[in-house]
Amino acid sequence: MTEVMFPARVMGNFVDTLSSEVGHDTLTAVLLKAGLPEEWAHAAHFSALDDARTALAYSRLQAALRTYYGRGARGIFLRIGTKLWSSLLDEAGVGVKAQSVLIRGLPKVLRRKPALELLAKLVGVKSGDITVHSLDLDLLFVDHVSATASNQTDDEPICFVTLGLIRECLFWAVGQEHDVEERACRSLGAQQCEFKITIGG
């Protein structure tokens, strides 16, 4: 079994975006109610953690928010995923920025898969943690590690931040909305979390 890891730099962005979305006081209240450390409301806290401990915090924080907000958590997480894409790209290194320019220079029809591969590079820790596959005309984004769903069980897929990231990444790449569905999730007992992106008619 692969050790679940999540990049501390992405976690810092996630916490900042979450805090601006729900408010710092509300985030602190969520942590208090869930018995989680109050310092988790501060992005800087995660810069000192390794990627394995960050993954655990990412999973537990999202679980606490789902408990606090119920069904309303989905919309919050989708919005966070949408905003997270821009901040990750803005703060990326020179190599990633150069790659993003190359992607935007491709014909639209050829941009989607490399854009998703760029997203995989930004939110994965190791090569192969997240893979992108062609399904005839459609695409499949596969998170083999899935920090969100680590040690979680639910009656529906829960990786809404990832879903928001995928949607925004594709909108950035080609300027149009896409139908993205999480069709397998580790919270439901699957081996990996799979997101189908419908492109074909």
Image (cartoon, rainbow, N blue to C red):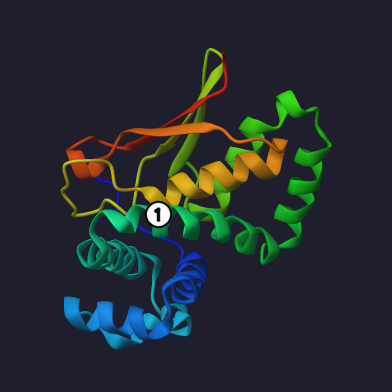
Give the percent coordinates (x, y) of residue 3: 29, 54
Seen in the image, is 198 located left or right of residue 174?
left
Q: Quick one: 62 or 7, which is closer to the camera?
A: 62
**Label 1 SS:** helix
Q: Name which residue lies at 50% across and 45% down.
A: 127
Picture quadrant where residue 42 is located: bottom left
Hey, which residue is sitting farthest right in the picture? Answer: 105
Q: Name which residue lies at 24% across and 42% down.
A: 186
Task: Quarter of the image for the N terminus: give it.
Answer: top left
Seen in the image, is 18 located left or right of residue 169?
left
Give the percent coordinates (x, y) of residue 122: 57, 54
Give the percent coordinates (x, y) of residue 159: 35, 48
Q: Quick one: 126 or 13, which is closer to the camera?
A: 13
Hey, which residue is sitting farthest front in the picture? Answer: 72
Task: Quarter of the image for the C terminus: give it.
Answer: top right
Q: Name which residue lies at 61% across and 45% down.
A: 169
Q: Quick one: 93 or 69, which is closer to the camera?
A: 69
Seen in the image, is 43 located left or right of residue 96?
left
Q: Is residue 25 above or below residue 86?
A: below
- Across the whole image, how many numbered discs are drawn on residues? 1
Three-letter code for the amino acid on which mark 1 is drawn? Gly
Work out whether residue 125 can be spotted. no
Give the percent coordinates (x, y) of residue 18: 44, 70
Residue of label 1? 75
Q: Name which residue lies at 18% across and 80% down.
A: 33
Picture quadrant where residue 38 is located: bottom left
Work out whether residue 46 can be spotted. yes
